[in-house]
Image: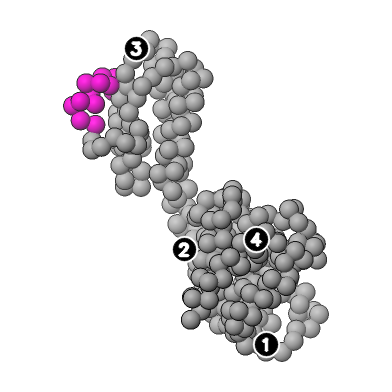
Amino acid sequence: MADQFFGKTVEEYILQLKKFNLDLKFVMELKVQGRLLRWPQDIAGNLDNNVIRLYPGHIKLISEGKRIGDYRWAGYLDYHQQTVNHLLLDNLLTKFQMFEQARHSLSCGMGVLNSAIKAIEAKDHYTKGHSDRVSQLAMKISDMFDVDYSEYDIEIASKLHDIGKIGVSEIILCKPGLLTEQEITEIRKHPEIGANILKPLPIFEHLVPVIRHHHEKIDGTGYPDGLAGDDIPLLSRIIAVADTFDALTSNRPYRQAMSTEKALGVIAGVKGSQLDARIVDTFLSLREHLLTAAN
């Protein structure tokens, strides 16, 4: 992820150079998460004497009082142009500081939320490992779609899809028989509860709709908002398929796990009504992988 962010941020910097008519050739090294990243990306080794000769202009990249990299350029810059370039580089470094802070916050936040997932599994031992399995399946399906989320977002959202069950009574979660209408209403609150848990956390706010809508159905009969079709976030629809498969193939208080073959048949049967047809077709293309994993 650091490599992607580095490349994207430098490309944005290059666009800014063009905007201000700064025709610069430059090389850059920057330490990101303990790694030394380079631009252009085919630079080998440190900025050696040959590079220094070709790019005589030099700026030490400083962040929070520490030297975190080097920037060298070739070409003449007058005083005004140097000032503009320094401002652009400061903007670039600020983005990396924010990236590092976000990663730290994400790590801390995930620690808290992983504890919440463990708490849910402690309440309902039938779902132990469910979040991890759904996450693995969702990531595999997402690889085949143009999903506007990073790999980390997909992993986080799918792991946290049931986080709202922390607010549901374990008596309901573990009930061996059929649920009453009142109990069904109670358990159907968990997507909304989960969204409300994540909403105050800025690092997760873009995932709130994904969590809220993972129990919506393509035909509009799902919950909590009765969204239909493409109004349901794509990642929610992907998680719904992975979640359904893992639920069907896991033991629950009210039934034994289905075989993989039978579960795939059930999923095929609700294609286009409950689950997104395109995602189901993609998922069913993984049949051999799923059957192998089950044996």
Q: Earlier in the sequence, mark 2 or mark 4?
A: 2
When the figure is inspected, residue 176 is found, relative to residue 111, above or below; the finding is below
Give the residue at mark 1: 254
Q: CA distance from mark 4 to mark 1?
A: 28 Å
Q: Amino acid at mark 4?
A: Ile
| Label 4 environment density (alpha carbons within 10 Å; few <14, some 14–19, many ≥20) | many
Give the residue at mark 3: 76
Identify the residue at image location x=62%, y=57%: 235
Identify the residue at image location x=74%, y=53%: 231
Q: Which mark is residue 279?
A: 4
Q: Residue 246 location, x and y as percent?
A: 59, 74
**SS under mark 4:** helix
Judging depth in this view, the residue of 93 and 24 nearest the camera is: 24
Tag nearer the camera, 4 or 3: 4
In the visual, does 85 lie left or right of 71? Answer: right
Q: Amino acid at mark 1?
A: Tyr
